[in-house]
Image: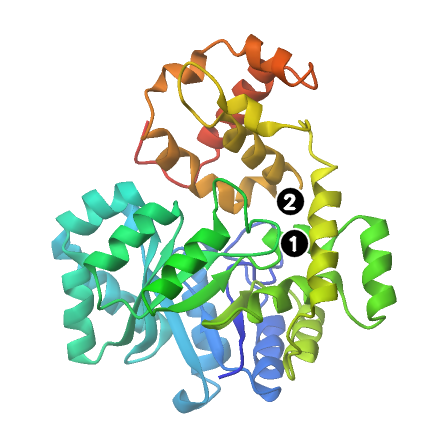
Amino acid sequence: MKKLGFGLMRLPVKSAEPTDINQEELNKMVDLFLERGFTYFDTSYVYHNGASETAIRDALVKRHSRDSFVLASKFPTFLMPKEDQADKILDEQLEKCGVEYFDFYLLHNLNRYLYKTEVADARLFEHMKKWKEEGKIRHIAFSYHDDAEHLDQILAEHPEVEAVQIALNYYDWDEPFIQAGKCYEVIRKHGVKVIVMEPVKGGALANVPAEIKAQMEQNDKNASPASYAIRFAASLEGVMVVLSGMSDLAQVGDNTSFMSDMKPMTDKERELLKSAKDALRGTWKYNCSDFDALDDNAYGVPISGIIRAYNSLLIQPNPYFGAELNYYKSFRTAYYRAFESGDFTAQTKSIGGAFDVNEALKEAIEFQIKNSFQTYID
């Protein structure tokens, strides 16, 4: 299987309504994707407010043979369904997609909180094993938004898992919230396949600063900034597929062109991506030379991670849809919440007044709580 996957979360639409999918355009995109030898499609119960599954049925399942594609979908763990609803939800998804089985089926958006509550209470991993025995799913997987420590715990307790989907890109490799590099290493340690989402970080890595874009073009005049980001992820050992949330035919054409015969990243290109990250960091709203100084506080809370995550959201084309919004509410469960109204004037001084830490922290927390995808923690 070629390493590029078609993520069905940002499909072309004819209006501002997410369910108003441009089916004719999607059909052309699917046809081109398959024509160029790619087979992996990734949807979900909730993408496009539930319309993604029916749209891919019409574009793919009804128009192409079942053995010509690999279809993945996801169980809506975060909607907190009860155990007696689990079978009904899977059957509903199979019907909406028009298939008898999913090649890969994922528990959607796992983190430390959902794992201990909804996943355990509804016995979802037990259901996944049962569904596999029944032939309704071929491979057990989950998507994950939390730190490497809790990922290690889940994989140690569930050896039946065959693949994990994580947000991974060169920008987030060392970022404290997403921990792409650390999570990748945990997955590899357990011998599980890696599915990559957000390789272009919601489009942010497709629009790098001009000086970096010029260097990329000097290195390869035909390579887009997005191609560097996708190839970075695809070059990692153990990566099964890299998902790209393509929204138009041109994006399908670009992504399939360089992934048809994907060339692994060179050392020179990796150094260029380090420069790209530094250049993007230079565009942050709140910046300083020593973010670690923010973490020396009376609460023992890594304040730097909260502000860095907020900065990262703001550089994305749609900050209200960034991966970081999956993380904050899980993160804050590990700390006494008094820090959210604490006084960090001393930290402002420790970074030489580069910015007002109290102001930045308040703004970052409010944004990440208000726009979080996770609604189960107040």
> Which quadrant, please, contains the C terminus?
top left
Q: Position of residue 129 (x, y in %)?
A: 17, 69
Q: Is residue 318 left or right of residue 336?
A: right
Q: Check the image and report above or below for 341 versus 127.
A: above
Is residue 134 something that shows in the picture?
yes
Please state which amino acid type lies under the numbered disc 1.
Answer: Gly
Task: Give the percent coordinates (x, y) of residue 85.
Answer: 17, 56
Dot placed on the residue nearer the N-terminal end, 1 or 2: 1
Q: Amino acid at mark 2?
A: Gln
Quadrant hosting residue 373: top left
Foreground residue, 12 or 208?
208
Measure the C-alpha gap from mark 1 to mark 2. 7 Å
The residue under the point 50% across, 24% down is: 295
For the residue labelled by badge 1, is the local secondary structure a helix, a strand or a loop? helix
Q: Residues within 10 Å of mark 1 (few under 14, many from 20)?
A: many
On screen, residue 254 above or below 209: below
Q: Which residue is mark 2?
A: 316
Q: Going 42% across and 59% down the picture, which residue do you hit?
A: 185
Left or right placement of residue 301 versus residue 254 in this view: left
Numbered circle sitting on residue 142: none
Q: Which of 277/330 is in front?
A: 277
Q: Which residue is mark 1?
A: 203
Q: Which percent across, then down, holds residue 193?
A: 39, 70
Which colour assignment does the render follow? rainbow
Between 228 and 249, the one nearer to me in the picture: 228
For the point 59% across and 80% down, the residue is 33
Query: Where is residue 335 drawn, in percent x and y?
Result: 34, 25
Check if mark 1's residue and mark 2's residue have beta carbons within 8 Å: yes
Q: Secondary structure at mark 2?
A: loop
Q: Could one spot residue 82 in this view of the protein? A: no
